[in-house]
Image: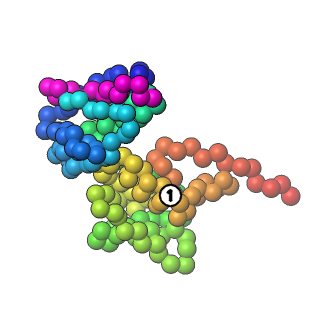
Amino acid sequence: MSRVAKKPISLPKGVELNVVDGGVAVKGPKGSLKTHALPGVSVVVDNGVVNIQLAEGAEDKFGGTARAVLANMVKGVSEGFERKLELVGVGYRAAMQGKALNLSLGFSHPVLFEAPEGISIETPSQTEILIKGSDKQLVGEVAAKIRAYRAPEPYKGKGVRYAGEKITLKEAKKA
């Protein structure tokens, strides 16, 4: 069994994990998540500690994956995940209109982005977007979709970028 799969997952206060036929359900203060079972992997809950066990003779390629997915689910329902985006460029701004995110990204029209179920989007300032949710994969997917509307270009660095993302700028053409 892999080193990752051997590490136990401790359940924080208020989080409960149930093994249901065909998957695992995790419930906590920030919501509830459900995933399907991976082949050859069984989940054992004992006194607030979750362990991954492989079936006899099963390949151990799913052990570490199952443990990582469960750990992310437990962290998501207890603390939640967030991703921060920054808008760089003259006239680039974001504002919330109800549940929709209104983006001005230099196009002839504003871009409206509807937040999916389980995701909350905030705009602390006109050039910052904060995406929050309990599902790590969904938070990352929403951030990538918003970034794809206007990815940072390599000459001036204008566009939507992840907070702290370093853009390598190209040198302009010499005359």
- 100 relative to 159, above or below: below
Residue segment shown in magenta: 46-59
Judging from the image, what secondary structure is the residue with disc 1 in? helix
Question: Which residue shows up at 60% across the image and 47% down it?
Answer: 167
Q: How many tags in the picture?
A: 1
Question: Which residue shows up at 61% across the image and 54% down it?
Answer: 157
Q: Would residue 112 be visible to someone looking at this image?
A: yes
- 8 relative to 23, above or below: above
Name, please, the residue furthest toward the bottom. Answer: 108
Question: Which residue shows up at 42% across the image and 72% down it?
Answer: 112
Q: Which residue in the structure is indicated by mark 1?
A: 147
The part of the image, by quadrant, that contains residue 125 is bottom left
Q: Nearer the viewer, residue 124 or 165?
A: 165
Q: Is residue 28 left or right of residue 161?
A: left
Q: Is residue 160 left or right of residue 5?
A: right
Return the x and y of residue 34 as percentages of the image width and height. 27, 48
